[in-house]
Amino acid sequence: MKKEIVIFTFDCIGCGKCVRRCPHHVLKLVDNGMCRFVNVVNEDACTGCGRCQEICPVKAIKIK
């Protein structure tokens, strides 16, 4: 079964730790001029390894 990555954008502090930790380049840090947050840009490449979820300091990422 394919894993799904869920980003809780309003909880995200935009630190980018998850982006740097992902070996498959699934995530991208976005700056909309008012705030920074993480977005999923390559969901098909996600293996569900959970590295992004583990490193998030505010638990804004969940692998389901």
Image: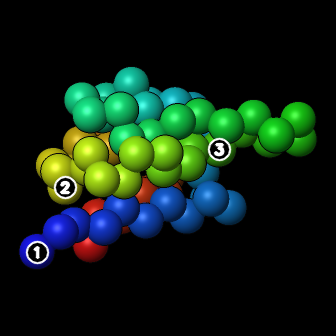
Residue visible at 36% across and 53% down? 43
- The amino acid at mark 1 is Met
Residue visible at 32% across and 44% down? 52
- The amino acid at mark 3 is Phe
Residue at label 3? Answer: 37
Looking at the image, residue 49 lies above or below residue 18:
below
Residue 13 horizontal side relative to residue 48, left or right: right
Residue at label 1? Answer: 1
Question: Few, some or many C-alpha atoms within 10 Å of disc 1 (few <14, some 14-19, many ≥20)?
Answer: few
Q: Distance between the residues labelled 3 and 1?
A: 28 Å
Label 1 vs label 2, nearer the camera: 1
Residue 33: quadrant of the picture:
top right
Residue closest to the far left? 1
Question: Few, some or many C-alpha atoms within 10 Å of disc 3 (few <14, some 14-19, many ≥20)?
Answer: some
**Secondary structure found at label 1:** loop
**Secondary structure found at label 3:** strand
Which color mode does the image show?
rainbow
Of the pair 1 and 54, the residue shown nearer to us: 1
Let me know if residue 13 appears in the view.
no
Percent position (x, y) of residue 63? 29, 64
Closer to the chain start, of discs 1 and 2, is 1
**Secondary structure found at label 2:** loop
